[in-house]
Amino acid sequence: MRADLRFSIQDLADLGDVSRRTVRYYVQEGLIPAPLGVGRGRHYGQPHLDRLLTVKALQAAGRTLDDIKATLGGTTVQRAAHRMTPAPERSVWRRLQLAPGVELHVAGDVTFPGPGRLHELADWCRTHFTPSSHEE
């Protein structure tokens, strides 16, 4: 097949022998790339069909969708470049303002010290990071 082919969601679903709803779900779950274009110009290309057929083959071999996602590495197609790139990694962070202009960013899996220790840290920051205390 030619690389410049464009498929509607229905065409892609028919070629992959799945429903349009399944195509949308696979896109949502990162199993196949998001469609290209915007609005009524949204379309799918050969990379989308190739990925859909790969997902279907792995399912037929008994793999779960989570396993398939891990196997495929959560890659997506860049809309502009039309090439495969890794999806950004997400993480949870907490932010504490210790003094004006001074923040502490703590990863979500790190345990905070007790309130007394946080107050000590905030007091230290207010003392050493105030706009009026310029040390040369």
Image (tube, rainbow, N blue to C red):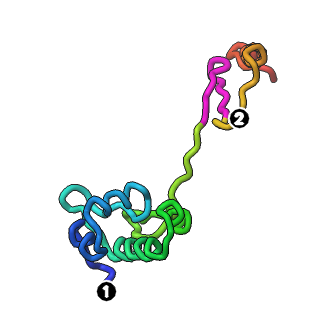
| 53 is within the stretch colored magenta | no
Q: Residue furthest left?
A: 40
Residue 108 relative to residue 34: left or right: right
Report the disc number at residue 111: none
Q: Residues within 10 Å of mark 2 (few under 14, many from 20)?
A: few
- Position in image of residue 116 (x %, y %): 77, 13
The kind of residue tagged 1 is Met
Q: In this view, does 79 lie above or below 90?
A: below
- Position in image of residue 115 (x %, y %): 72, 15
Residue 7 relative to residue 130: left or right: left
- Position of the C terminus, as image quadrant, is top right
- Position of the N terminus, as image quadrant, is bottom left
Secondary structure under badge 2? Answer: loop
- Position in image of residue 133 (x %, y %): 75, 15
Tally the numbered discs: 2
Q: 116 or 37: which is nearer to us?
A: 116
Secondary structure mostly taken by the magenta-highlighted segment of the chain = strand
The kind of residue tagged 2 is Val
Secondary structure under badge 1? Answer: loop
- Position in image of residue 13 (x %, y %): 26, 69
Identify which residue is drawn at 65% across, 32% down.
105
Determine which residue is flagged by label 1. 1
Q: Is residue 27 above or below residue 16?
A: above
Identify which residue is drawn at 31% across, 74% down.
16
Q: 98 or 50: which is nearer to us?
A: 50
Q: Residue furthest right?
A: 136
Q: Residue furthest bottom?
A: 1
| 103 is within the stretch colored magenta | yes
Report the disc number at residue 110: 2
Magenta stretch bounds: 93-106
Residue 44 relative to residue 31: left or right: left
